[in-house]
Image (cartoon, grey):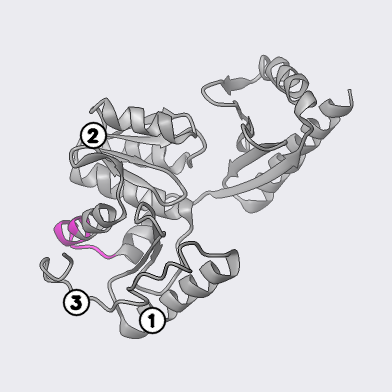
C-alpha cells in the first residue's frame, strides 16, 4: 500500500513469525534502537514500528530520535488540529496538557476520556472527533473506522507532513515542552477504598477532576491517581514544566497513598 502511495520503503523484519508474536522489553528496546540507527543512516523522513496486532505505532523522527508515547501523541494531535481546523481531538485524562496548549493556539478542541479503551472507542463512535489518541501508540480516525489502525496512523502522518511541507523533527521541536513522570504504588485490594476516600477528601480543597481516578492541579503542574482495575496497585502520573517539579509531585502523592494505607 505504501508503495502505491509513492513511498520509498526500507522494510525490517517484514514477515510473520508465529513464535514471535509479542516482544519482551529487551526485544522491543533492541528493535527500536535498530530502527533509530537505520532511519538516521538512510536519512529517511521517519521510521515506524508496528505492534503485533498492527494497532499501535512507535516512531523515530528524521534525526533518529526515538519518540516517547507522549511526544507521539502531541505530534499526532498537532497534525490533526492543523489538518482539521476547528476540529476536536479526544485523548485520555492522563495525556499531556501540552495538547490543550496546542488546541488553544490552533483553535482546536480537546475532549478528555477515561483511560480505558472502551471510553476511547465510544468517543470515536460518537462521530464528533477527528482523532482519538493515547500515549501507548494507538490512534483512531473515526471517518475511516472507530478502531485503532497502525497503517492508517502512518498514512495520516505522511499526509500531514506532505500537505504542511514539514518534517517530523521540525514539528517535534516546536511542541510545548513539559515533563511527564509515572509511578506505581503497591496497595492491597482491601485498602483501595480507604485510599480513594482519603484522596477525594483531600481533593475538596484543591482544583480537581474526577473523570477517571482523581486529577489534582497544583501550581507546579498536575497529578492523577488511578486505582488499577486488575492489579493491587495505584497509578500515579504527574506533569510539570521540569523533571524536578514532576518528581516532587510523584514523590508527594505516592507517599500519601502509602500513608493512607496505614491509617
Q: Which mark is residue 87?
A: 2
Q: Earlier in the sequence, mark 3 or mark 1?
A: 3
- Name the main secondary structure of what is drawn in magenta: helix
Residue position for label 3: 8
Q: CA–CA distance between discs 3 and 2?
A: 31 Å
In the image, which residues are magenta? 159-167
Instruction: Name the one closer to the observer, 104 or 214.
Output: 214
In the picture as drawn, the residue positioned furthest to the front comes out as 18
Q: CA–CA distance between discs 2 and 1?
A: 35 Å
In the picture as drawn, the residue positioned furthest to the right comes out as 262
Residue position for label 1: 38
Q: Quadrant of residue 248?
A: top right
In the rendered image, the quadrant that contains the N terminus is bottom left
Q: What residue sits 65% from the left and 38% below the top?
A: 235
Q: Nearer the viewer, mark 3 or mark 2?
A: 3
Q: Secondary structure at mark 3?
A: loop
Q: Is residue 160 magenta?
A: yes
Q: Secondary structure at mark 2?
A: loop
Amino acid at each position: 500500500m505504501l508503495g502505491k502511495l509513492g513511498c520509498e520503503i526500507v522494510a525490517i523484519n517484514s514477515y510473520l513469525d508465529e513464535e514471535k508474536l509479542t516482544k519482551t522489553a529487551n526485544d522491543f528496546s533492541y528493535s527500536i534502537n535498530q530502527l533509530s540507527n537505520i532511519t538516521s543512516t538512510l536519512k529517511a523522513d521517519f521510521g515506524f514500528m508496528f505492534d503485533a496486532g498492527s494497532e499501535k505505532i512507535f516512531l523515530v523522527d528524521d534525526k533518529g530520535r526515538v519518540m516517547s508515547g507522549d511526544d507521539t501523541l502531541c505530534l499526532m494531535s498537532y497534525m490533526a488540529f492543523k489538518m482539521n481546523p476547528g476540529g476536536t481531538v479526544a485523548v485520555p485524562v492522563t495525556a499531556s496538557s501540552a495538547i490543550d496548549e496546542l488546541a488553544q493556539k490552533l483553535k482546536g478542541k480537546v475532549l478528555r476520556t477515561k483511560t480505558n479503551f472502551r471510553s476511547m472507542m465510544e468517543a470515536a463512535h460518537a462521530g464528533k472527533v477527528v482523532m482519538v489518541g493515547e500515549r501507548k501508540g494507538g490512534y483512531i480516525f473515526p471517518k475511516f473506522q472507530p478502531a485503532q489502525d497502525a497503517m492508517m496512523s502512518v498514512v495520516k502522518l505522511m499526509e500531514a507532513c506532505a500537505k504542511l511541507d514539514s518534517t517530523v523533527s521540525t514539528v517535534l521541536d516546536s511542541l510545548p515542552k513539559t515533563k511527564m513522570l509515572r509511578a506505581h504504588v503497591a496497595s492491597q485490594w482491601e485498602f483501595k477504598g480507604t485510599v480513594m476516600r482519603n484522596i477525594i477528601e483531600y481533593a475538596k480543597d484543591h482544583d480537581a477532576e474526577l473523570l477517571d481516578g482523581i486529577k489534582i492541579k497544583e501550581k507546579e503542574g498536575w497529578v492523577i491517581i488511578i486505582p488499577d482495575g486488575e492489579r493491587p496497585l495505584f497509578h500515579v502520573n504527574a506533569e510539570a514544566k521540569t523533571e524536578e517539579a514532576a518528581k516532587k509531585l510523584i514523590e508527594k502523592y505516592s507517599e500519601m497513598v502509602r500513608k493512607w494505607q496505614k491509617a
